[in-house]
């Protein structure tokens, strides 16, 4: 009853842990369709579930953006087929209605941030890569992992259902600031739509916590022999910090939501004070503070952007190194900067609130902390570029998307330096400059990271390749389109064009942008259709793609490529391989690559 | 504690330690309660003094939290690295608390400055049956000079 | 023990084992509690923020002055809540003893101390139920605050809003802790842990229970003392 007991505890705990015993190898219990594809506890299947659910949401969210771009780009036009398609509430007379416009903008934001880029990105790749790359048969708790997906699925269903309620989904912006979100009388979407929104988000928080705790425990406890923390691929480090961010920040959002639920339903005034609602009159609520909600929201909200970005960063680091056939430049600096970003993520939240009534002196401290983020970000960019430098680059679609990520991260990150200044923010807040900034640096960049990951690990997921030519088309149109959509928005924002307006053509100051807006909308539609092309490629290739014939098609060092082409539940046949070196021995001693499982030779040089 | 090479499970002292910690927790709670009772008799005007007592109570609270986490939850006897993974993230609370409370205080200044109705409301006393009226006078005077001293006092109520 | 405990410290992070000598379940419980600490932290910090942004606040010694079965109008501040606090501390002690007994594979000790812990938890919940009922009778509820500020001015409802929300959330944690402990008790009585050869589950339940006690230390201070 000492250490041994501690170590055998999981095995004895009886749930599933025979999968971790080394003697078992690939492990076949009788699997039905339900246990294999629906309530699966295999991390690889759960990853695919996350990915495909995320894709469904990406299509819906993207479609929503196309619809509201239609309104911004063609404010005077009528599209009668829209009413036939969407109904009167959404598109009366073939024109997106104001309430539909705000509902679309809000749902687009919520869905893309939480369902696509949090669950779809880190849910997919944390599940898929953590056990494979650290050398574990599955997650620490496969059952909780399964629950994590199903909580996400339930959250998805609730959110989807909110689109179909009578008054429409919540329409007060994805940040759900009170009083708009707290008062049912404030707007149509603040009624049932908001209730469903809150339920969905609460379920999502549970899902994210279940997942995050699992990821952390797996990375810490389940690494295979020899896999010390400093031998982990950078993907794992990034996913690890992502999980830490989620576990520490989502609870704060949860608390904020509970207070909001009380404000909505039980007559409290946590966030409410001195409110007069048109048609209702003065409300009795007194003593609350709407700024408090903003603090609570952004205490999650800011770490959230790194929850979105870090997995992309990690995968890009890995893909750049593999396809440059060079070790990643500054491995420890990469970990250090990830760590610095994770810490700073918690210290800078109020830079989203510079002009909402935040104390200006406090704001100045937040400026300082915010601008500090430039340091680790610059380190990362420098290291990515120096990894590419004189590399023997293979331009696979994954590699192109990884390079595209670096490009977008630089151009979006630079505008962050502007927005991080509270003085400049007086002019720039709530304009299209902000839209351009966060879409490029967080939205599109992370999408690129996700695409890079999908192209790179698709052979491991499905044992087939994605079509390369379609991949190239996908990449070039997407990157050109992303810049064509978001670059002009900087100019609009600098000229003062505010976000979230329904019709800019009625404003004398913004009439000049009518053509530009139409241009952006057109490109948005083209880019969206190219994403459909990618989906076709994806689903076609699952069944009909070119078959993978070698275990290690990219010549990569990491452990997932030592598993069979179609790994079963348990990942490795026989014993889990032992690890002897870090993940980045590319081009060392004249060898193209040396897998982590190869023992260090006597004549080998030190890296 | 020399427990590293030893087996883990007995490293945490045993019954003797539990008794010791129980006594410490009891004593700390009693001291807190004594301070709490004492504070009833300290008039509101002595704001900084009240604040000092409250500060002492908070320190005692943190001491109690330490004993519960370290001994009851056994954290002190875990490996140092594990202690760090739990204690370091808690350091985030420092800025969390400072920023939130500072901004809360600032919001009250804003309202008192720009919302005369609010300010006025908080000075109207309501007749009360209880005998706490000796502490009535200073509370929130219609002193329009928003001097920091008065504000500080209110913050500590 | 001889095999796994050799040369600790040198290869802790080397992979193939837990760097903390802790099985994953306990690790997850710890990190879950950490995230729960942020939930409660956010509640209490929100409470502080609102208190800092409000002119005046009720005096807890006036609000929480009653005692069960005492005549109306009795003035006994802090007395009832100190009893609640001690109940929780003692139940935490019995939980430690249960974990301790589990380490020694002492089934009887585990059963005895778990029962005491459950009784403590139920006693605490009853106390809280009485206090809530009493306050409710006085007119306090979410959105209703009958109490005046310390200086005699009208108070905003946020005093009661936060009181009921946070003590309610804590009470919910106590309640789930009692449920967990009852499950542990049943599992102990049916010899599940004997069969496994260890009582590590009790340890995890214990962590949760102590956390509930820990939160109370903060709630007690924030609402009743300062």
Image (spheres, grey):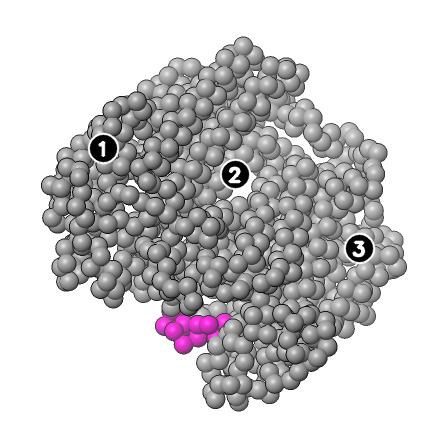
Q: Foreground residue, B78 or C166?
A: C166
- Residue depicted at 52% across the width and 15% down the height: C110
Q: Specify the principal SS of the magenta part.
A: helix
Q: The residue tagged with tag 2: helix, strand or loop?
A: helix
Look at 32% across and 48% down and name the residue there. Answer: C157
Choose top left, top right, bottom left or bottom right for residue C226: top left
Q: Mark 1 = which residue?
A: B36
Specify whether B15 is left or right of B122. Answer: right
Mark 3 residue element: helix
Q: Which mark is residue C31?
A: 2
Q: Is residue A116 visible?
A: no
Dot in front, 1 or 3: 1
Magenta stretch in the rendered image: A421-434
Q: Residue at x 50, y 18 (%)?
A: C114
Of all chains, the one bearing label 3 is A
* Residue A544 colored in magenta in the image: no
Residue C127 percent across, percent down from the top left: 38, 26
Q: Are marks 1 and 3 on the same chain?
A: no
Chain containing the residue with disc 2: C
Q: Quadrant of the N terminus of chain A?
A: top right
Rounded to the nearest angstrom, the CA distance separating label 1 from label 3 is 67 Å
The answer to whether the residues at label 1 and label 2 have Cβ atoms under 8 Å apart is no
Provide residue B88's location: percent of width, then percent of height. Answer: 44, 42
Location of mark 3 (residue) = A459
Q: Position of residue A282 (x, y in %)?
A: 36, 62
Which of pointers 1 and 2 indicates the residue nearer the eye? Answer: 1
Question: What residue is rendered at 41% in x and 50% in y?
Answer: A267
Label 1 element class: helix
Distance, label 1 to label 2, CA atoms, is: 34 Å
């Amino acid at each position: 009853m000492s250490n041994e007991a501690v170590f055998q505890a999981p095995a004895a705990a009886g749930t599933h842990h025979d999968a971790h015993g080394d003697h078992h190898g690939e492990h076949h219990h009788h699997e039905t369709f339900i246990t294999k594809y629906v309530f699966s506890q295999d991390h690889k299947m759960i990853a695919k579930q996350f990915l495909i659910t995320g894709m469904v949401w990406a299509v819906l969210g993207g479609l929503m953006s196309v619809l509201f771009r239609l309104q911004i780009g063609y404010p005077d036009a009528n599209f009668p087929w829209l009413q036939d398609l969407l109904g009167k509430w959404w598109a009366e007379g073939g024109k997106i209605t104001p309430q539909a416009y705000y509902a679309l903008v809000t749902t687009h934001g919520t869905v893309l941030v939480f369902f696509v880029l949090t669950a779809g990105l880190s849910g997919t790749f944390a599940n898929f890569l953590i056990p494979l790359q650290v050398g574990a048969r599955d997650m620490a708790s496969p059952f909780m992992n399964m629950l994590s997906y199903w909580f996400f699925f339930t959250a998805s269903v609730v959110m989807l259902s909110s689109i179909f309620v009578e008054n429409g989904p919540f329409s007060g912006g994805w940040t759900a600031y009170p009083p708009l979100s707290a008062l049912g009388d404030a707007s149509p979407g603040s009624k049932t739509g908001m209730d469903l929104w809150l339920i969905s988000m609460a379920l999502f928080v549970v899902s994210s916590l279940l997942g995050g705790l699992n990821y952390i425990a797996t990375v810490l406890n389940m690494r295979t022999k020899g896999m010390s923390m400093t031998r982990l691929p950078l993907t794992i480090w990034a996913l690890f910090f992502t999980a830490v961010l989620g576990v520490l920040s989502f609870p704060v959002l949860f608390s904020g939501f509970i207070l909001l639920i009380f404000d909505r339903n039980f007559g409290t005034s946590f966030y409410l004070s001195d409110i007069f609602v048109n048609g209702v009159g003065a409300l009795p609520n007194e003593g609350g503070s709407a700024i408090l909600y903003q603090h609570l929201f952004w205490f999650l909200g800011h770490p959230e952007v790194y929850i979105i970005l870090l997995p992309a960063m990690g995968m890009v680091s890995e893909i750049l190194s593999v396809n440059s056939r060079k070790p990643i430049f500054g491995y420890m600096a990469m970990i250090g900067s990830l760590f610095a970003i994770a810490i700073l993520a918690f210290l800078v939240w109020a830079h989203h609130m510079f002009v909402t009534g935040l104390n200006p002196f406090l704001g100045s401290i937040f400026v300082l902390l915010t601008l500090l983020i430039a340091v680790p970000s610059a380190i990362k960019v420098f290291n990515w570029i120096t990894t590419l430098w004189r590399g023997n680059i293979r331009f696979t679609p994954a590699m192109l998307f990884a390079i595209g990520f670096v490009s977008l991260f630089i151009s979006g990150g630079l505008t962050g330096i502007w927005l991080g200044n509270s003085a400049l923010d007086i002019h720039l807040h709530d304009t299209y400059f902000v839209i351009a900034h966060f879409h490029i640096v967080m939205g599109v960049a992370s999408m690129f990271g996700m695409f890079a990951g999908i192209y790179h690990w698709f052979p491991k997921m499905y044992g087939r390749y994605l079509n390369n030519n379609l991949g190239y088309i996908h990449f070039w149109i997407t990157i050109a389109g992303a810049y064509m959509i978001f670059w002009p928005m900087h100019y609009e924002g600098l000229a003062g064009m505010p976000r979230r307006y329904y019709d800019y053509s009625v404003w004398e100051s913004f009439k000049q942008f009518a053509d530009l807006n139409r241009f952006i909308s057109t490109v948005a539609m083209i880019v969206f259709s190219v994403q459909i092309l990618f989906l076709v490629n994806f689903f076609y290739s699952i069944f009909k793609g070119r078959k993978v014939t070698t275990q290690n098609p990219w010549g990569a060092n990491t452990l997932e490529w030592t598993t069979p082409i179609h790994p079963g539940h348990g990942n490795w046949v026989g014993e889990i391989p032992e690890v002897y070196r870090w993940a980045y021995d590319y081009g060392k001693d004249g060898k193209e690559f040396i897998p982590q499982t190869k023992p260090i030779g006597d004549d080998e040089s030190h890296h | 504690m020399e427990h590293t090479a030893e087996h883990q499970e007995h490293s945490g002292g045993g019954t003797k330690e539990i008794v010791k910690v129980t006594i410490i927790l009891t004593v700390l709670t009693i001291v807190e309660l004594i301070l709490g009772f004492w504070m009833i008799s300290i008039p509101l005007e002595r704001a900084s003094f009240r604040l000092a007592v409250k500060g002492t109570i908070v320190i005692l609270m943190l001491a109690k939290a330490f004993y519960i986490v370290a001994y009851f939850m056994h954290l002190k006897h875990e490996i140092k690295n594990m202690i760090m993974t739990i204690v370091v993230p808690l350091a985030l609370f420092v800025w969390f608390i400072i920023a939130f409370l500072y901004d809360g205080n600032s919001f009250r200044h804003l309202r008192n400055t720009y919302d005369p109705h609010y300010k006025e409301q908080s000075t109207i006393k309501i007749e009360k049956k209880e005998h706490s009226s000796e502490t009535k006078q200073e509370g929130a005077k219609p002193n329009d000079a928003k001097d920091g001293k008065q504000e500080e006092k209110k913050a500590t109520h | 023990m001889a095999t796994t405990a050799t040369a600790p410290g040198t290869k802790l992070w080397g992979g193939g084992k837990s760097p903390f000598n802790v099985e994953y379940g306990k690790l997850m419980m710890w990190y879950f509690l950490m995230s729960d600490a942020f939930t409660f932290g956010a509640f209490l910090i929100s409470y502080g923020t609102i208190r800092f942004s409000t002119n005046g606040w009720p005096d807890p010694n006036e609000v929480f002055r009653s005692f069960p079965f005492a005549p109306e109008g009795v003035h006994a501040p802090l007395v009832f809540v100190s009893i609640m606090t001690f109940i929780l501390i003692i139940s935490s002690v019995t939980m430690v003893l249960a974990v301790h007994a589990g380490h020694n594979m002492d089934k009887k000790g585990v059963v005895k101390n778990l029962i005491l812990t459950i009784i403590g938890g139920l006693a605490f919940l009853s106390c809280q139920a009485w206090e809530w009922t009493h306050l409710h009778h006085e007119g306090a509820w979410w959105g209703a605050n009958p109490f005046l500020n310390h200086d005699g001015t009208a108070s905003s409802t946020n005093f009661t809003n936060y009181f009921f929300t946070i003590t309610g959330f804590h009470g919910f944690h106590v309640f789930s802790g009692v449920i967990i402990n009852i499950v542990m008790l049943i599992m102990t009585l049916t010899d599940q842990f004997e069969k496994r050869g260890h009582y590590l589950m009790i340890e995890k339940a214990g962590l949760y229970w102590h956390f509930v006690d820990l939160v109370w230390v903060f709630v007690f201070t924030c609402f009743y003392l300062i």
